[in-house]
Image (tube, rainbow, N blue to C red):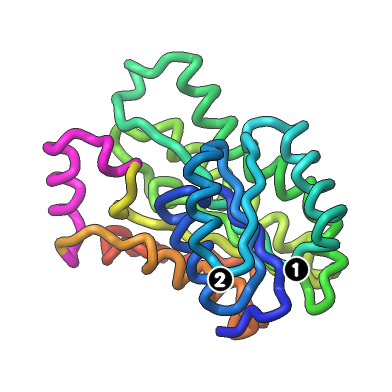
Amino acid sequence: MDFNGKTVLVTGAASGIGNACAKGFAAAGAKVILSDINAEGGEAAAAQLPGAVFMQMDVTSRDEANALAARIEGEIGGLDVLVNAAGWDIIEPFMKNTPEYWEKIMALNFMGPVQLTRAVLPMLIDAKDGGRIVNVASDAGRVGSFGETVYAGAKGGVIAFTKSLAREMTRNGVRVNCICPGPTDTPLFATQSEKMQVALTNAIPMKRLGQPSEVADGVLFFASDRASFVTGQVLSVSGGLTMVD
């Protein structure tokens, strides 16, 4: 896949799936903008990629999303691809959730992508060959997940947001698609208890975790010209854990 001449913004790019996406796009020739709340990690990640830049942002802040969009337009001149990869979760029973936990889950996993998408959408509409948006949701949002009830709701919202925005944006030449990872070998997954990690891995028919690069491959496909007739679609990358009609 060739992304020469394209500018790509990836959130959550300091580590995990976001970082793998940034690496994939850079290897395919794109100018990559890495964004993350973690400035130290983001700067280090950008320094490893040719021509990449880091722009710090808290995706839960509408003001910071708008400021990032203005900075990209002012300093770079436009945007071709947005990858909403930032996310966060803690596995615990719904009855143990606090309202503060709900608010953080929704702000980061649902409203974050909504706010940033709205902020950069004018640039994507103006993109020469049509803008592309790839949202990273979760299979929890497709089929539910024990201990992730509100997270699953947020990711289900991302899936519905993807499909609805895709319908609206076809007239503007912007394609919008969604990747749903299953359990993946990321720093966030490593924060789970050993018992939970073993249980989640054993539940996967392929009997292993996904790698961030495998999720990134799906993201790059949706953003590429090879998916030129694909919009409003959801792809599970989960080793067979979920099989959705």
The residue where tag 1 is placed is: 131
Magenta stretch contains residue 32 = no
Q: How far apart in space, not on screen, are marks 1 and 2 (Cα)?
A: 18 Å
Q: Residue at x 83, y 60 (%)?
A: 123
What secondary structure characterizes most of the magenta part? helix
Instruction: Determine the image quadrant of residue 230.
Output: bottom right
Q: Which residues are magenta?
A: 188-206
Instruction: Determine the image quadrant of residue 91.
Output: top left
Task: Please tell me whether residue 41 is drawn above or below residue 105 in the rendered image.
Answer: below
Amino acid carrying mark 2 in the image: Ala
Give the numbered dot on residue 26: 2
Magenta stretch contains residue 190 = yes
For this view, does 124 lie left or right of residue 147? right
Task: Please tell me whether residue 188 is drawn above or below residue 15 in the rendered image.
Answer: above
Amino acid carrying mark 1 in the image: Gly
- Number of marks present in the image shown: 2
Instruction: Determine the image quadrant of residue 32.
Output: bottom right
Counting residues from the start of the chain, the first of labels 1 and 2 encountered is 2
